[in-house]
Image (cartoon, rainbow, N blue to C red):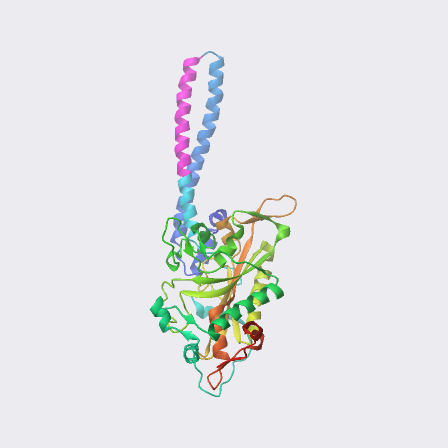
Amino acid sequence: MLDLNFVRENLDTVRTALRNRNFPTDLLDDFAGMDSERRKVIAESDQINARRNAASKEIGALMQSGKLDDAESKKVEVAGLKDRQAELDEQRKEFESRMSDLLANLPNIPAADVPVGEDEAANVEVRRWGTAREFDFEVSDHVDIGERLGILDLERAVKITGSRFAILNGAGARLERALVNFMLEVHTREHGYTETLPPFMVNRKSLFGTNQLPKFEEDLFHIKDERGFALIPTAEVPVTNYYSDEILEAKDLPKYFTAYTPCFRSEAGSYGRDTRGLIRQHQFEKVELVKLTMPENSEEEHEKLTANAERILQLLGLPYRTVVLSTGDMGFGSRKTYDIEVWLPSQNTFREISSCSNCGDFQARRMNLRFRRAGGSKPEFVHTLNGSGLAVGRTWIAVIENYQQADGSVVIPEVLQPYIGGLEKIG
């Protein structure tokens, strides 16, 4: 959530940022109007308070001089002022509540170095790693390979549940598990993250904290009972909320967490996109990276987090490129995002496999997550960062397609073989 005072004092800056994000600016007009009325209410309340204080002194003087009737008359006047002040306080609270609701629906302000553009066409490639393999046979996609090898069953998943679900069997399921274990080992042993296993359901307060609510209500799978839980769309939600409503000590920052979880998304608005195979599923697995940092370190930590995610692809020998998202393509809560895109031979293109974002203090304000520097200084909001390290299903796809062989088999990357019982090939 944006800081109320920042928005109040920088309306033109915020308005420009919203335009750059293709976001309507009429809410800012509503904000300015409400803020103006709120200020009038506060000014009148302050005037009444001054009159009440003066009247109280006057009543005391009248009582001392024996003018009791005049004192009682003045008391009636003060009582009326008190009632009016109570009305004004309620109006102020109402304006502040409406302004807070409005701010909850405004996206984050992009960082100064984020490219300005309407959509993904304005994204800028910042680096590329690896060389796409040249095949001397006709390339198959992961669906054909998986079904041919008996490790992927989409038809029965549809029968059991519905579209955009999948079943992995045998070596396919083992490969998925191997990828999870491999990613967690690299991030904990090489990159210093603490592994955590959070709940797979969260409450509405947590969803508000990481800005899934109120804007992305329809993207969630809700548990229909009185508790109002929802299945997590990403481990970012429970992990980033771990310290919500707490004040951390500066000496304990940064904090690094990694978590494996299934993720559940309704994919509202994406019908017709990536309907074949595992690219866009309602249920998928992900290894998430979350960082909590001091404000002055968040940009450096963002670069490190992105490099941590890239390291997985490097170890697997999968070509990829990293792009910085434009203002029109970045997520609601992000101030800067890198997308890592892995090479998929069947599509002859790069596809997103990780999105690494620096949210600044945007989420911390929503979840009231703060830290205090040494010396007992005033608490400040932490900066939160998150990214996929990686999306496991899409990594499965990339391994299957990039390591396919002419005889229909799939070679297991050497670095993964210890995690899959030494298996060298699926065939």
Q: Residue at x 37, y 48 (%)?
A: 226
Does the magenta stretch mainly form a helix, a strand or a loop? Answer: helix
Q: Is residue 70 magenta?
A: yes
Is residue 114 visible from the viewing direction of this image? no
Which region of the structure is painted magenta?
Answer: 67-92
Q: Is residue 50 above or below residue 68?
A: below
Residue most toward the right?
A: 375
Residue 241, image x and y in percent?
50, 53
For the residue pair 30 and 403, the one nearer the viewer reads as: 403
For the residue pair 96 and 48, the one nearer the viewer reads as: 96
For the residue pair 148 and 317, the one nearer the viewer reads as: 148
Residue 411, image x and y in percent?
52, 80
Is residue 402 visible from the viewing direction of this image? yes
Residue 237, image x and y in percent?
48, 56
Residue 414 sits in quarter: bottom right
Residue 97 sits in quarter: top left
Residue 279 sits in quarter: bottom left
Residue most toward the bottom?
A: 136
